Image: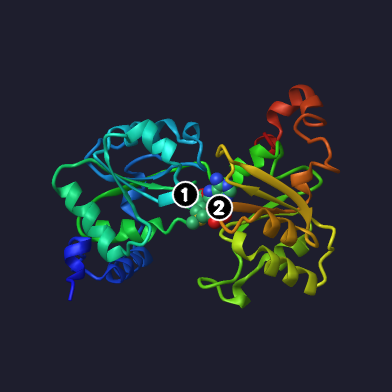
């Protein structure tokens, strides 16, 4: 019989769940003292910590300056597989060892990064978009910290923002959408009772951005129809936002399922529900209207800092 360890390398001796539980216990009592160690844009000294970097939605130009600097200095880049554009890896870390995290569990990933860090190699962890959105970064960070390896986060451009730019719109739009929901549909990870897409759509002035739901668009739309939502509600699907093969499908709750099935997309798309994607019916903003015309009184206005930018 094959020894699985021989094929996959060393596995963690510590149960990563213990690290998560320990971090939760500590967080429950004291303030996390690491919060003030570094601001989000500050570059950690290579080798001091493993940075968890948002690679952005795909286009190499949408990696932040800080992220690029760290990736260029890396010896080992652990990345999120096909969600990270190989053009970005070629452009910024062609000489580094590159390992996809796809199909690897925490028991394999943690020692891989820990051992490389302890051997003095510069390790970076590249997540797609921003690690804070459906990134599963924290469990890796807690497990590494539990084993004495410092970690840090460098934010990235989440795919909803790339989709919004592609559509030449805003996710919040005066008179149309005052709120944005980042959400996912029910499935293996989410129980049906925790699927809130229908509630967000029902609120009306919300732009609902569905991640991880490309494969389930027809079923998701069927549920919205069964719940009595307007079949004409705009739904826009942005496939591979910012990639060379980017595609946009504009339809409605009633028609998007068939359109996406016909296009053959089963992953890597963002579903945007709401009028903001169509840019119709919005009103001019207070910022460049009444507030701007208040003259000197505007400088002492109490809500000056609260206007849109
Ligand atoms: C595991 S989640 C990671 C999200 C990522 N952390 C982010 O901030 O964009 C993967 C999902 O993000 C969305 N996604 C990622 N990259 C995308 C892109 N370039 N265009 C459209 N959707 C994308 C898809 O919905 C995909 O199923």
Residue 207 badge: none
**Residue 26 falls left or right of residue 255:** left
Q: Is residue 292 visible?
A: yes
Tell whether circle 1 marks a residue whose Cβ is less than 8 angstroms from ligand 1.
yes
Which residue is the site of mark 2?
Answer: 268
The residues tagged by marks 1 and 2 sit, at their Cα atoms, a distance apart of 7 Å
**Mark 1: few/some/many CA within 10 Å (<14, 14-19, 20+):** some
- Quadrant of the drawing holding the N terminus: bottom left
Q: Which residue is mark 1?
A: 83
Report the side of 36 relative to 48 (left or right).
Answer: right
Please report the residue visible at 58 percent of the width from the left and 57 percent of the height from the top: 211
| Local SS, label 2 | loop
> Dot 2 surroundings within 10 Å: few (below 14), some, or many (20 or more)?
some
Q: Which image quarter holds the C terminus?
A: top right
Which tag, 1 or 2, sits closer to the chain's start? 1
Q: Are marks 1 and 2 in contact (CB under 8 Å)?
A: yes
- Residue 14: where, in percent of width, then height? 21, 68
Question: Which colour assignment does the render follow?
Answer: rainbow
| As drawn, 223 above or below 283 | below
Q: Quadrant for residue 200, please give it.
A: bottom right
Task: Estimate the x, y position of residue 50 in percent, counting from the top left.
Answer: 28, 46
Furthest residue toward top: 296
Residue 112: horizontal and vertical position, in percent?
23, 55
**Rendered residue at 33%/67% (across/down):** 20
Please state if 283 lies on the left or on the right of 152 as rendered.
right
Viewer-nearest residue: 113 or 87 = 87
Question: Which one is nearer the viewer's eye here, 259 or 71?
Answer: 259
The quadrant in which residue 39 appears is top left
């Amino acid at each position: 019989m094959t020894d699985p360890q021989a094929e996959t390398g060393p596995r963690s001796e510590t149960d990563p769940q213990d690290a998560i539980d320990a971090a939760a216990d500590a967080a429950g009592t004291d303030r996390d003292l690491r919060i003030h160690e570094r601001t989000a844009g500050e570059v950690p000294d290579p080798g001091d910590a493993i940075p968890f970097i948002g690679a952005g939605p795909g286009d190499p130009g949408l990696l932040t300056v800080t992220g690029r600097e760290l990736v260029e200095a890396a010896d080992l880049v652990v990345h999120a597989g096909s969600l990270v554009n190989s053009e970005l890896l070629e452009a910024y870390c062609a000489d580094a060892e590159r390992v996809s995290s796809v199909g690897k569990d925490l028991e394999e990933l943690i020692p891989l990064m820990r051992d490389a860090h302890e051997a003095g190699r510069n390790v970076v962890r590249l997540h797609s978009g921003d690690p804070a959105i459906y990134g599963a970064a924290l469990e890796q960070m807690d497990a590494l910290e539990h084993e004495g390896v410092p970690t840090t986060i460098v934010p990235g451009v989440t795919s909803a923002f790339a989709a919004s730019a592609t559509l030449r719109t805003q996710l919040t739009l005066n008179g149309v959408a005052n709120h944005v929901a980042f959400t996912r549909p029910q499935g293996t990870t989410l129980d049906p009772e925790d699927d809130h897409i229908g509630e967000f759509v029902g609120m009306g002035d919300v732009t609902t951005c569905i991640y991880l739901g490309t494969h389930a668009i027809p079923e998701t739309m069927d549920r919205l129809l069964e719940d009595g939502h307007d079949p004409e509600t705009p739904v826009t699907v942005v496939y591979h936002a910012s990639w060379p093969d980017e595609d946009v499908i504009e339809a409605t709750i009633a028609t998007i399922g068939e359109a996406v099935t016909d296009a053959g997309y089963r992953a890597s798309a963002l579903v945007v529900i709401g009028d903001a994607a169509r840019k119709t019916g919005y009103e001019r903003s207070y910022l460049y209207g009444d507030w701007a015309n208040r003259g000197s009184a505007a400088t002492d206005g109490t809500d000056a800092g609260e206007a849109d930018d």
